[in-house]
Image (cartoon, rainbow, N blue to C red):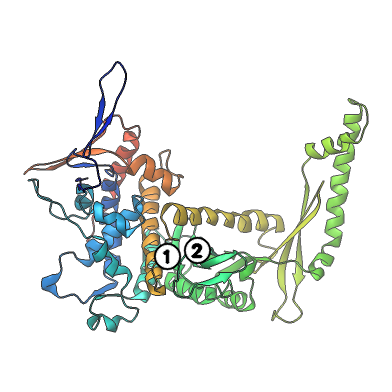
């Protein structure tokens, strides 16, 4: 990174040591970068054309003779910054001088010691403050970059469809919402009693590790607000390419609503499994199953206690020890159930009844899959429970790609920030699924991949014949980098 000297930054740092030579540190190493692994991201982005297609969803109303940085370059620079761990626009005031970012964005880099300048924070800020109404772009004095919400949302589905070599037999769409805490006076921010803070409540749709939708919402709306319309939009676009794929929609109890379930039931090849809150009627209908689970647990407990009494002196602690040695008894049951007023028809509800030393734990899910297709226990454990994996996607988005950095004033600007973070996730997931499958990083989280494979120190040498990025020879993950490179070479070139 090219150093930028200021009055308050020392030019040299000296560490004295007894009986040995002093250690001197400075920021005058020349064209050195700490982000050499960005070369992998730039190449997979070039092959898949992700940021370039996102740029096509924007409208540029700037005067051509005053454009120094194209929309494509601005978007790529912003998203690459997120991938490399730079969450703020302020970071780009220094990153604009980093030769690795210049190479990744494919801008011309000079051989001489001329300053390298990419877009600064003020220019990048115009992306995130573009007017919500595109037509205002020609009239606005400062925010002359607009975007098409519909086109951006379609792009997520297009990239997902392209990730499959052929139409799959079945896909599972996970619906969920998370909290996005804010600490300012942003538009449409409200206090949410469930999360106990002022926040947004973005709605996500994932298919495994593939991100299909990320919609920012105010936190004062119903958890299922907009879920049906998003689901309809996503499935409609999927059906344009995959006519026969079976789709299972999955979510927690917030989505077991009549309108969502009725729509899924009306669509061919669309099933659902949603969590369902318990009530007195459902608890009463599981009384027989609860008694069987309790009886089974007590039988196992008495058998273990009898055995322990042959080894130890009988006392009260034997019961506690025995209960720790046996597993809880779990029973599953299908129930034909209909609410008194809110449901239009009876539906299959699966109850999971668990009995242990702490008593009963009863949970319910509602599904459109008939009993003759899947056993109640298999439905609960194999179809519903894996939805918890979606929490890991939230962690990657928020903790490692800064999707919760929604600190601009406008709601539209914060939605764009969420989309930029989402595109950064899509790029990282593409690297993981297409290039790291047979490596130790094939199931690694985004932050781990960044630390081990992307944040690499390197010396950059530029001549008239080539640009050499010389990565540290003691890098412990050079073999994984080589594997990723070989996989990238196998991907077809665009066009």
Residue at position x 18%, y 54% in the image: 106
Which quadrant of the figure contains the N terminus? top left
Q: Most extreme residue toward the right, as rendered?
A: 314
Q: Where in the figure is residue 251, as x and y percent of width and height?
A: 59, 64
Q: Quadrant of residue 147?
A: bottom left
436 displayed left or right of 323: left
479 displayed left or right of 263: left
Q: Where in the figure is residue 258, as x and y percent of width and height?
A: 64, 77
Q: Most extreme residue toward the top, as rendered?
A: 19
Q: Secondary structure at mark 1?
A: loop
Residue at position x 88%, y 31% in the image: 307
Q: Quadrant of residue 255?
A: bottom right
Q: Where in the figure is residue 32, as x and y percent of width and height?
A: 21, 40
Q: Secondary structure at mark 2?
A: strand
Which quadrant of the figure contains the C terminus? bottom left
Mark-to-mark CA distance, 2 and 1 = 8 Å
358 displayed left or right of 247: right
For this rendering, which residue is in front, 177 or 33?
Answer: 33
Q: Earlier in the sequence, mark 2 or mark 1?
A: 2
Marks 2/1 in contact by CB < 8 Å: the verdict is: yes
Residue at position x 19%, y 57% in the image: 118
Q: Which mark is residue 180?
A: 2
For this rendering, which residue is in front, 33 or 39?
Answer: 33
292 displayed left or right of 79: right
Which residue in the protein does label 1 denote?
A: 406
Q: Quadrant of residue 143?
A: bottom left
Q: Most extreme residue toward the front, as rendered?
A: 7
- Give the vertical position of 491 relative to 65 (above or below): above
């Amino acid at each position: 990174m090219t150093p930028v000297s200021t009055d308050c930054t020392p030019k040299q740092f000296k560490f004295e040591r007894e009986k040995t030579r002093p250690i001197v540190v400075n920021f005058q190493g020349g064209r050195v970068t700490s982000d050499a692994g960005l070369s992998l991201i730039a190449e997979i982005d070039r092959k898949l054309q992700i940021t370039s297609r996102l740029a096509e969803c924007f409208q540029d109303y700037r005067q051509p003779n005053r454009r120094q940085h194209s929309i494509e370059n601005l978007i790529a620079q912003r998203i690459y910054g997120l991938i490399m761990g730079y969450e703020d626009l302020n970071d780009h005031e220094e990153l604009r001088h980093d030769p690795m970012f210049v190479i990744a964005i494919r801008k011309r880099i000079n051989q001489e010691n001329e300053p390298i300048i990419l877009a600064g924070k003020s220019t990048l800020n115009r992306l995130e403050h573009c007017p919500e109404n595109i037509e205002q772009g020609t009239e606005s004095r400062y925010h002359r970059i607009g975007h098409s919400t519909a086109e951006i949302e379609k792009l997520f589905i297009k990239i997902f469809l392209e990730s499959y070599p052929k139409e799959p037999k079945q896909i599972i769409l996970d619906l969920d919402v998370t909290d996005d805490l804010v600490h300012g006076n942003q538009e449409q921010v409200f206090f949410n009693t469930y999360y106990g803070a002022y926040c947004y409540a973005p709605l996500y749709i994932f298919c495994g590790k593939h991100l299909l939708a990320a919609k920012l919402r105010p936190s004062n709306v119903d958890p299922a607000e907009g879920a049906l319309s998003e689901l309809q939009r996503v499935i409609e676009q999927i059906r344009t390419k995959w006519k026969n794929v079976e789709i299972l929609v999955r979510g927690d109890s917030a989505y077991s609503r009549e309108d969502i379930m009725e729509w899924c039931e009306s669509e061919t090849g669309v099933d659902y499994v949603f969590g369902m809150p318990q009530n007195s009627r459902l608890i009463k209908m599981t009384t027989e199953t609860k008694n069987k689970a309790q009886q089974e647990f007590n039988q196992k407990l008495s058998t273990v206690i009898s055995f322990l009494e042959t080894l130890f002196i009988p006392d009260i602690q034997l019961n506690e020890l025995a209960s720790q040695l046996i597993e809880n008894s779990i029973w599953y049951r299908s129930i034909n159930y209909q609410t008194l007023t809110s449901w239009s028809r009876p539906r299959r509800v699966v109850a999971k009844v668990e009995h242990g030393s702490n008593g009963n734990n009863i949970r319910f899910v509602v599904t459109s899959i008939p009993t003759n297709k899947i056993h109640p226990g298999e439905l609960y454990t194999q179809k519903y429970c894996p939805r918890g994996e979606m929490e890991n996607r939230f962690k990657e988005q928020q903790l490692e790609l800064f999707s919760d950095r929604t600190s601009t004033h406008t709601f539209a600007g914060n939605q764009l920030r969420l989309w930029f973070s989402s595109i950064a996730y899509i790029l990282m997931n593409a690297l993981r699924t297409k290039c790291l499958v047979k490596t130790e990083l094939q199931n690694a989280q985004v932050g781990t991949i960044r630390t081990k494979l992307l944040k690499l120190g390197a010396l950059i040498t530029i001549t008239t014949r080539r640009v050499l990025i010389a990565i540290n020879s003691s890098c412990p993950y050079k073999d994984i980098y080589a594997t990723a490179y070989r996989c990238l070479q196998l991907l077809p070139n665009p066009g």
